[in-house]
Each structure stands twice: as structure tokens, then as C-alpha cells.
């Protein structure tokens, strides 16, 4: 089964005891019975990759120019300010990938963005997303 961006966006994952009480979702499918985000617990990663750009000087137009013809979603992060926009960029890939392949995906994307990706996104785990309750930020 292949999971795409639309399916991933609709999936809900429940946090482990170490997580907060809000639901979370992530761009990977855990193996049956796994409740943690360790590499050995990941069955497969979706056919898209999520990276952060924290360097200044990036705009949505510049991101678009670096990804000609590619399907992507980009949004500013909570630490973004008008004078220094910070971005989360989610790029559609041609297929699902493994945790072992994610490093190659990240390095390729880092080249596309001129070496300016946040190095903390080299690891697939930080790209989990906690959902928020209605009326809360």
C-alpha cells in the first residue's frame, strides 16, 4: 500500500507516554505494534519528504524557483518572522522510501536548496506534526 500526502494528512497517530497529550501524525508508517518513532520501528516513509529552511533570504517565490515542476507544500514555521522567514517544505517524491534511503533524499534536497536546509531535518523523526485543538495555537 502506498501512502500519499492526502492520506498522510488525514491519518492520526497517538503519542507515546513521553509525548504530549495531543495527537500527532508523521510521514511514516510504524510496524504493527510499534508505538515509538525509532528507525527500527518504521515500516516505510511516505512518498514525500519534509525539510526545514531556517536561513534568511528565502521566500515562497524562491522556493518555487528551486523546485520547478515539482509538487510541494511550503509554509512558514512558528519561529518565522517577516524579517527572517523560516520554512517547512514538503516535497512529493516518486515513491515511498526507507529510513536508510532518507539520508540520500535529504542530501539531494539540501543541494537543491544550496546547502541551507536545517541539519536537524537530516533525521526523519523531527518531522512529526502535532495537531492542535480548535481555538488553540
Image: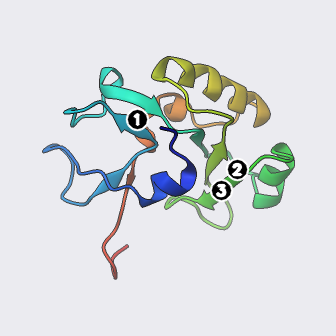
Which residue is rendered at x = 38% and y = 37% of the image? 29
Q: How crowded is mark 1: few (under 14 residues within 10 Å), some or many (20 or more)?
A: some
Q: Compute the Cα span from label 2 to label 1.
A: 24 Å
Q: Name the residue under label 1.
A: 125
Q: How crowded is mark 3: few (under 14 residues within 10 Å), some or many (20 or more)?
A: some
- The local secondary structure at tag 2 comes to loop
Answer left or right for 91 relative to 66.
left
Does 37 sit above or below residue 54?
Answer: above
Which residue is rendered at x = 62% and y = 33% of the image? 95
Residue 74 in the image, given as x and y percentages of width and height: 65, 56
Nearer to the camera, 117 or 106: 106
Residue 129 in the image, given as x and y percentages of width and height: 40, 52
Q: Residue 90 carries which label?
A: none
Q: Do the residues labelled 3 and 1 touch (CB within 8 Å)?
A: no
Count every numbered label the image shows and give the total.
Answer: 3
Q: Mark 3 points at which residue?
A: 73
Q: Quadrant of residue 55?
A: top right
* Extreme-top residue of the structure: 100
- The local secondary structure at tag 1 comes to helix
* Quarter of the figure that contains the C terminus: bottom left
Does 28 sit above or below residue 90?
Answer: above
Residue 118 in the image, given as x and y percentages of width and height: 58, 37
Q: Mark 2 points at which residue?
A: 56
Amino acid at each position: 500500500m502506498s501512502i500519499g500526502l492526502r492520506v498522510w494528512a488525514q491519518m492520526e497517530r497517538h503519542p507515546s507516554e513521553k509525548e504530549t497529550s495531543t495527537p500527532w501524525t508523521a510521514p511514516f508508517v510504524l510496524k504493527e505494534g510499534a508505538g515509538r518513532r525509532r528507525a527500527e520501528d518504521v515500516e516505510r516513509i511516505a512518498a514525500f519528504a519534509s525539510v526545514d529552511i531556517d536561513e534568511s533570504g528565502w521566500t515562497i517565490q524562491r522556493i518555487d524557483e528551486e523546485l520547478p515542476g515539482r509538487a510541494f507544500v511550503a509554509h512558514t514555521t512558528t519561529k518565522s518572522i517577516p524579517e527572517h522567514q523560516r520554512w517547512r517544505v514538503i516535497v512529493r517524491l516518486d515513491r515511498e522510501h526507507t529510513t536508510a534511503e532518507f539520508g540520500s533524499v535529504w542530501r539531494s534536497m539540501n543541494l537543491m536548496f544550496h546547502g541551507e536546509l536545517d541539519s536537524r531535518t537530516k533525521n526523519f523523526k523531527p518531522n512529526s506534526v502535532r495537531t492542535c485543538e480548535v481555538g488553540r495555537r
